[in-house]
Image (cartoon, grey):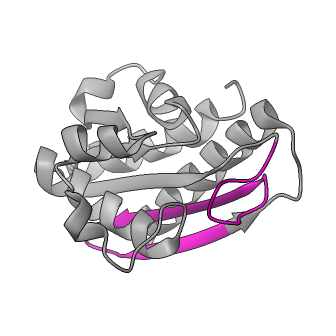
Amino acid sequence: MKDLVPIAEQIAARLIERHQTISVAESSTGGLISAALLAVPGASAYFLGGAVVYTREARRLLMDIPDGAMKGIRSASEPYAQLLASRIRERFSSDWGLSETGSAGPTGNRYGDAAGHSCMAIAGPEQSVRTLETGSADRPANMQVFAGAALKLLLENLSR
């Protein structure tokens, strides 16, 4: 987590400067993205909330995404990451929504993605989606890398 806080500090500075807010929906990072953003003193000025959307039930209950809305979309994909980012932004009425979904390991997921696969997305004034493949089965390391990549994606969009 120590590696994530400096990125989160830069994000916090930009959000506070702009008087903007963020909400987070994350899956295989297990809350690391939110934890990094909350580790910065004064986080209440920009962080509205987040959810660990790890299961289908969590997707339904926390994100209010019914199974029907998933037609043609599979988890751990760019379209799903974009849907999560947009939905968390809507649910919290935040300026920005950030999402991550993937397969941390040590094995791949049931959709055929190898361990080390993650998709992340930004919804807000800028839209962006990215896929990352670490090629590693190290679950804790992948979680850390995924969280860092998602935070960097947000920082890139805030820097435009």
Residue 143 horizontal/vertical position (percent): 69, 38
Tell whether 57 sits left or right of 41.
Answer: left
Tell whether 149 sits left or right of 94.
Answer: right
Residue 154 horizontal/vertical position (percent): 47, 58
* On screen, residue 60 above or below 31: below
> In what quadrant of the picture does the N terminus appear?
top right
Q: Nearer the viewer, residue 124 or 43?
A: 124
The answer to whether residue 95 is magenta is no
Numbered range of the magenta stretch: 107-131
Q: Is residue 64 visible?
A: yes
* On screen, residue 12 above or below 118: above
**Residue name at image x 33 percent, y 59 percent:** 85
* On screen, residue 2 above or below 64: above
**Residue name at image x 78 percent, y 60 percent:** 114
* On screen, residue 2 above or below 113: above
Tell whether 89 sits left or right of 157.
Answer: left
The answer to whether residue 120 is magenta is yes
Q: Is residue 95 visible?
A: no
Q: Nearer the viewer, residue 67 or 103?
A: 67
